[in-house]
Amino acid sequence: MDQHGNWAFVMRAFTKTEKAAKYGLFLLDCLVGAAYVGFIVSFPVVVVRLLQQPLFSILITIGIIFAVTVIGYALGILDTRLQDALAQYTFAFRFDYIPVFSALIFNWRQSDIDSVKGKTVIDQAYESIYNGGNDGIEAIVDNTFQVIRNSIQVVVVAAVLGYFNPWLIVIVLAINIAEYGLQRVANRWFARHKAEENQITSYQSYFTRLLLKRSSGKDIRLFNMLPLLHHHLLTLGNGVVNWQRRYSRVTTAVGIAQVAINALGMLGTLLFLIQSQTVSIENIIVFITAMQVLNTRFTTIRQAYAEIGRNLSYATNFRAFLGYAQPTERALGLPDIGQIRNLQLRDVSFAVSDTTLLHYISLNLTAGHPLAIVGENGAGKTTLIKLICGLYTPTSGQITINDRPRAAWTNASLLERMAVEFQDDILLHFTIAENIALVVPRKIDYAKVNEVLQAVGMADFVQHLPQGVQTMLGNELDPNGISLSGGQKEKLLFARVLYKDADLNILDEPTAALDPLAEKQFYALASQQLQNKMVIFISHRLGSLTLQSQIMVLKNGRIMGVGTHADLLQSCQYYKKLWDAQKSLYAVGEQNEKD
Amino acid sequence: MKKIKDELYGLWTTLVLMNNLDKRLVYLTLATSLLNAANPYILIVGNTALLNAMLNHQFSGAIQIAVTTYLTVIIVGVLAQLLQQAMTVNATRANEMLKIQMHEEWEKVDFATLETKQYYSIMNKSDASFRYSGGVQAFFYQLQTTVQNTLAIITGASLITWMVAYRITAVPHLLGITLVTLAVLLGLELFLSRLYQHLTGKNIKIFSQLMTLEKQMNYFLLQVVNTYSNIKAIKLWQMSDVIQTRYKAVWRKEKTQNQELIHIEYNSQIVSQLISSVAIVAVFTLVVFKMAIHILPISNINTLFAGVVQIAASVSALVAAWQHLAQFQNQIQYVQKVLTSSQPPKQLTPIQYLPTAATNLVLQFDHVSFSYPNRGEVLHDVSFTLPFKGVTALVGENGSGKTTLVKLMLRLYTPTNGVIRLNGINIQQIPLAEYTRIFSVVFQDYEVFDIPVDQNIASDITIDQDKLTKIIQDWGLADWLGHLPHGVKTPIGGFSTENFQPSGGQQQQIAIARAAYRDGQFQILDEPTSSLDPIHELNVFAKIKRLSANKPSLFITHRIGATTLADQVIMLQAGRIVEIGPAKELSQHSAYFRQLWESQAAMYKD
């Protein structure tokens, strides 16, 4: 763990912008702080000297003392003002990374997003910027400032003290090194055991999120689950208390030791002074004041240094995330695909770790000949789509588009010409228009938006909304946002597909939330709107559309059969089983009717 | 003045709330504050006495004073640390208790209220308030700081006052000058405190604005960026642009507010520095003057300096703590709202005779209508009789009101008009716990919890093992439970090392097993097969048929074909019952039924 390297990385990132302003401000702050502390320590001596050996008349003496006091405290206030300006910079440093992070994540390789390691890197990196000023990169910079600023002040005070007796510096240093050692004990305990506490609190947040997801409320009430939940919440609560008890034992022991060392140290030094019989008010005053100031400054340095150490674990994650290898656009000079005319898969297989998810899949797709991929949950349908979209690369076999390998075209142009609707697609809490066009408002073709709304049968509904297509969906960004039914949501998601007007359209379980009538209507609409395009439908049920298309049946990642409905009823036993199961509900009725 | 009174009153209510959680905490806080406030002054007084002894060349006396002083400091310091430890642990416990109380209020509130926007907003705010306020520990820490520094200021001020008042009449005009200076000082201090209050008010306002913005930022972070299943669509549709534009708009607002907040916090610090330095300068000058004209011994210079430094530090700590207490008060009000305004479901006077013991139950809807708050009517004048016998199918298109009807049946909702009766008795009069025990339910959006599988099924800690084993066998869970590391005791979810994530199908089996274990007198199943492929779906319908021989049930479906499995069919259209009766009869005399049947069966005709 290259701690120093990580620290340097964070500080370099901080000083990348507005270098002059930041350095200047900090320098000024250190000077002012040092001047202020010099004032605090030497002022008592000045006063005593002026009182004991008056050089001027009383009034002027008082006047001088008054003036110096005012200047001194003004320095203190100026110092605070400068720290305000610095705090603005350190806050902005951390906060500016938030949109940077999201932009980076949106460009990650799919395999990295899907891996546990990738997700962990992201989650941990966010902790370095999203937990406020006390944890993360902001804390590193703030505490670095504290260390430097206070160290300078320590030097100033030590100089004053040393003028009186150099041994005093040594004693003070020794006391503080001992206290630092004790502090590290507490910090190490914390670092070692924090993970346990994290586990408990993240489980607790699960229960909170569970209850905030109000749909869970039905089961909780209907099954009288209050005692069960109480048991779990209580266990977790006790876990937190126990952890805190163990941690407090450590911090209290450390605290007691520090109190003792501090007091004994001061006592020892005083006894030393008494023995040496250096008696003058000035000496004693300076010593007492300087000791107090040094103590607080050293404590601040210790704590700040320990905080830097603690936060460097965040710096590791921060650095890891920013440096996570990203796909570079492959060879330059690749052509853009003008229009996707055909798609071919030849013996495509795909495996993740040691599990093969797809075995030797081959298919051929052209415009006007829709393909329906059918199979139970877990058969590999969604995985196949991800391969076609280029989110994954096949482990063997080849995908060709317009008779050339997929990699022979620029990825951007391919994405332009295809539209994929996944089963878990969400609508964003933005306007209806933004959700359909998926571009910023000034680039939206509103005529087209209205056209597709008409096509999916939502035009009336949207027209009757007070703000029409500018109505916000969901209530996260606008408390007055509307909520849509499952059916309406599916229609908008399909409107998205229509708006894009792509050559290759893939719809993954687009009607899961719809009843059969609505499902039938949807497929009628879809097949009509996409009749001259390349289309793949995915479903776990056989619907009216499957009967009209070429069908591919998948089970456990293998093709069980390909062909028309009539073909498959003859040649594929599994398909016949599916068909009979679905039909049986209605066949019984027919039998009853015949009776 | 009123504002301070309001703040003190708010503080008092919070103290009462905290005291109810743990009575020892307030005493521990006071004791710790006392000790911590005392220590610096023990040191000051000791050092001044030491100085005196030294000036009078009483060195052995000096040593004695030094040792006594510092040993006392150690003892007091150690005691304070031990009390602090007890305080921290107890405060943590109180915090956890408060969180549990709050969560349980969420669990108990009437379901229709739970679904409203207003209650959701209160829930979110009360949850967020723990994070923003720092919890009970933060409250007691700030309280301790406040009390401690108040005591310190009082002590220090007394010492300084003694020095100011000492022999004040010894010199002509001294009293007059002192009083004038003090009057001017008071005026300035009042002005500065007003300024500080103003800043505190701005602080709180910005803080609550920030909470709203934070929630919006969290939407983007948690529901868009960190919901990794979204990333594939974001890439394929190139949504980055539109998302980042909106994200940055919110982000910019929060950045500005935060920077403003930082300004205010530092300005508050400056004001507090002014408050103390103005006083210090004035008092200092007066006292030094007295030393200059020799009416005050010069050894007191130590008390003066040290006292002044101590007061300055205490003032800035006090005003910061006061501001934090005000912030805390502002946050915790949401928790208090949840605790005091919770409304368990309506319960009319419960009756003595509970009809649940009887075996033949009949549910009756008597002209029942229902509308959601602020929305139109969803069910209109529904009347029917449902004996708990055999299998009933509740059918209709999406939006016809099927789920609402069932929620009314289960007392999750209360009718806005009309009455629901069980064996003639208004269900509102039956104790809620007894009433819900009658039913075993599986909703379409059932919840499988991240707890052990057996607890998910039994909905309880105490589990009837024989019953559980039988259920597991009956419903096909035995197949995959056998492959799990701890079998049925395996915890679900990522909070345990096993990290068992059941598939959609397995989750549905768990939900069905839960209903089966419940063994209510009536089963209700809402679209039990929507995510299953035809073969698995048929299995479930077959099981429903099998198990309804011994247990009456009602299932909601939009597959008209499934009505053949039922003895009776209730058909809803646009919130009204249009048909009710056996499936065979319906196909004969209901045109609407035949229309729906045809639309679904058409594709199976050769």
Image: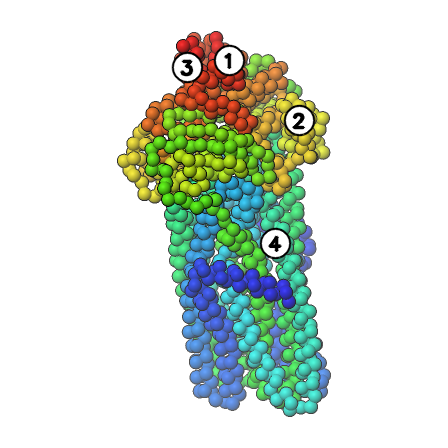
Could you tell me which chain the residue with mark 3 belongs to?
Answer: A
Q: CA distance from mark 2 to mark 4?
A: 42 Å
Q: CA distance from mark 2 to mark 3?
A: 40 Å
Point out the tag, 4 or 1, that comes first from the N-terminus.
4
Q: CA distance from mark 2 to mark 1?
A: 29 Å
The three-letter code of the residue at mark 4 reads Phe
Q: Residue at x 56, y 52 (%)?
A: A132
Neighbourhood count class around disc 3 (C-alpha, 10 Å): few under 14, some 14–19, many 20 upward: some
Point out the tag, 2 or 3, that comes first from the N-terminus.
2
Q: Position of residue B264 (x, y in %)?
A: 65, 59
Q: Residue at x 33, y 27 (%)?
A: B550
The residue pinned by badge 4 equals B207
The residue pinned by badge 1 equals B602
**Which element carries disc 2, helix, strand or loop?**
helix
Asked if badge 2 and badge 1 are on a common chain, one would say no
The residue pinned by badge 2 equals A460
The three-letter code of the residue at mark 3 reads Val
Could you tell me which chain the residue with mark 2 belongs to?
Answer: A
Q: Which mark is residue A588?
A: 3
**Which element carries disc 1, helix, strand or loop?**
helix
Left or right side of B91 for B298: right
The three-letter code of the residue at mark 2 reads Asp
Neighbourhood count class around disc 1 (C-alpha, 10 Å): few under 14, some 14–19, many 20 upward: few
